[in-house]
Image (spheres, helix red, strand yellow):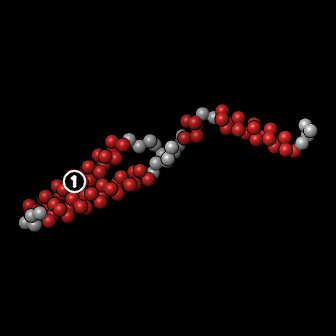
Amino acid sequence: MDNDPESEKIAAMAARIKEAGAKPVAEEVRGEAKPLKMSSVGFDFLGAVLVCAFLGWLADRTLGTKPWGIIAMLLIGFAVGITNVWKALGNQKPE
């Protein structure tokens, strides 16, 4: 029974499992996406909204379109911020 093909397959599979378990996780992760800092995502979102709000306020002041410039640019800033967050989180691997 020692020459049974099934027992040889099982022994080979057990050896592969032991070999895979012996590898440190850090070696497998190297070279992939860097971990994302959540604070940077929040600052990206906030920055997009604030910059667009400033541009809307500036447009209202120079063009005389008083609430419409800031309203439109806040909506655009929100959309840009959501897009930035979506892109940043889309590049991450699930744990």
Q: Position of residue 79 (x, y in %)?
A: 29, 60
Say above or below: 75 vs 45: below
Amino acid found under the numbered disc labelled 1: Val
Secondary structure type for disc 1: helix
Name the one closer to the observer, 4 or 18. 4
Say above or below: 59 vs 28: below
Give the residue at the far front of this rendering.
1
Query: In the picture provided, is 43 more to the left or to the right than 71?
Result: right
Examine the image and state in which quarter residue 87 appears. Answer: bottom left
Query: In the picture provided, is 81 more to the left or to the right than 53?
Result: right
Q: Position of residue 46 (x, y in %)?
A: 26, 49
Residue at 25%, 50% in the rendered image: 47
Residue at 13%, 59% in the rendered image: 58
Q: Position of residue 26 (x, y in %)?
A: 55, 36
Say above or below: 41 vs 17: below
Q: Which residue is mark 1?
A: 51
Residue at 58%, 40% in the rendered image: 28
Crowding around mark 1 (Cα neighbors within 10 Å: few <14, some 14 to 19, many 20+) is some
Image quarter (top left, top right, bottom left or bottom right) of the N terminus: top right
Examine the image and state in which quarter residue 61 appears. Answer: bottom left
